[in-house]
C-alpha cells in the first residue's frame, strides 16, 4: 500500500516521498492511512498546524535522529493554545511580552512515541492504542524509521469492513 510521507524540517522546508507499507488484512500495514506527516522537534507549532491542515492530517510524528520520539496532534496544539503556551496569531507575541513565539513541536508533543510495526496483528495494536490512550500510532520499519501512521479511525474502518480483521 503506498503511503505519502511528508516531512517538515525545523527550518520549515518540506520534503515529500512515497513509501510502500505492506500488510495483510489482519495486520497493521494493510490499514495505515494514506499519508504520514513527520516533523523535526524544533519545528514551530504554527508550522506544524499549517502542514497538518494542508495535508488533512490529524497528527504529525516528531522525529529526532531519524526515529520517532513523540506525536503532536491537533488536540495537543489546541490544548497548548487554550493554556496560553502558544499563539497561532502573528500578533500574539506583540500583545503579550511573556509569550514565546518559538514554541516547538517537542514542547507540545505527546512523548514518548508509542509505535508499532506493519506486520503486527491489528487487534494487538488496537489494544495497545487503548491502554496507552493514543489515537495515532507511528508505524515503523525494521530500522525504526516511520513508514506510516495507524489511526483509531483506520482500526474502526477495518473492523466495520471485516469483523475478523
Image: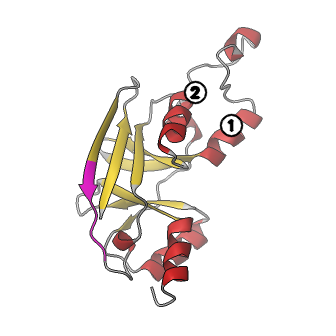
Quick check: 110 left or right of 125?
Answer: right
Nearest the eye: 157 or 121: 157
Residue named by callout 1? 80
Q: Residue at x 43, y 60 (%)?
A: 33
Q: Secondary structure at mark 2?
A: loop
Q: Quadrant of the C terminus?
A: bottom left
Q: Quadrant of the N terminus?
A: bottom left
Q: Residue at x 52, y 50 (%)?
A: 111
Question: Does 93 appear in magenta?
Answer: no
Q: Residue furthest bottom?
A: 164
Sequence order check, earlier mark of 1 and 2: 1
User: Callout 1: few (<14), some (14-19), or many (20+) C-alpha neighbours within 10 Å?
Assistant: some
Q: Residue at x 69, y 18 (%)?
A: 99
Assess whether mark 2 and mark 1 are in contact (beta carbons under 8 angstroms).
yes
Quick check: 128 left or right of 138?
Answer: right
Q: Position of residue 156 (x, y in %)?
A: 56, 74
Q: Position of residue 5 (x, y in %)?
A: 34, 47
Quick check: 143 left or right of 74?
Answer: left
On screen, residue 129 above or below 60: below
User: How is colour applied across the structure in the image?
Assistant: secondary structure
On screen, residue 25 above or below 85: below
On screen, residue 160 above or below 55: below
- Magenta highlight range: 18-23
Circle number at residue 42: none
Q: Position of residue 97 (x, y in %)?
A: 72, 11
On screen, residue 80 above or below 87: below
User: Callout 2: few (<14), some (14-19), or many (20+) C-alpha neighbours within 10 Å?
Assistant: some
Residue named by callout 2? 103
Amino acid at each position: 500500500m503506498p503511503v505519502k510521507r511528508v516531512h517538515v524540517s525545523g527550518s520549515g522546508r518540506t520534503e515529500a516521498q512515497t513509501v510502500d507499507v505492506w500488510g495483510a488484512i489482519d495486520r497493521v500495514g494493510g490499514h495505515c492511512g494514506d499519508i504520514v506527516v513527520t516533523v523535526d522537534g524544533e519545528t514551530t507549532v504554527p508550522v506544524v498546524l499549517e502542514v497538518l491542515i494542508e495535508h488533512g492530517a490529524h497528527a504529525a510524528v516528531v522525529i529526532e535522529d531519524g526515529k520517532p520520539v513523540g506525536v503532536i496532534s491537533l488536540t495537543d496544539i489546541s490544548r497548548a493554545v487554550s493554556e496560553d503556551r502558544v499563539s497561532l496569531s502573528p500578533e500574539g507575541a506583540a500583545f503579550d511580552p511573556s509569550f514565546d513565539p518559538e514554541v516547538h513541536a517537542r514542547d507540545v508533543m505527546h512523548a514518548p512515541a508509542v509505535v508499532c510495526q506493519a506486520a503486527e496483528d491489528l487487534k494487538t495494536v488496537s489494544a495497545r492504542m487503548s491502554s496507552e490512550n493514543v489515537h495515532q500510532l507511528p508505524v515503523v520499519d525494521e530500522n525504526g524509521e516511520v513508514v506510516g501512521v495507524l489511526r483509531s479511525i483506520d482500526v474502526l474502518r477495518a473492523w466495520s469492513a471485516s469483523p475478523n480483521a
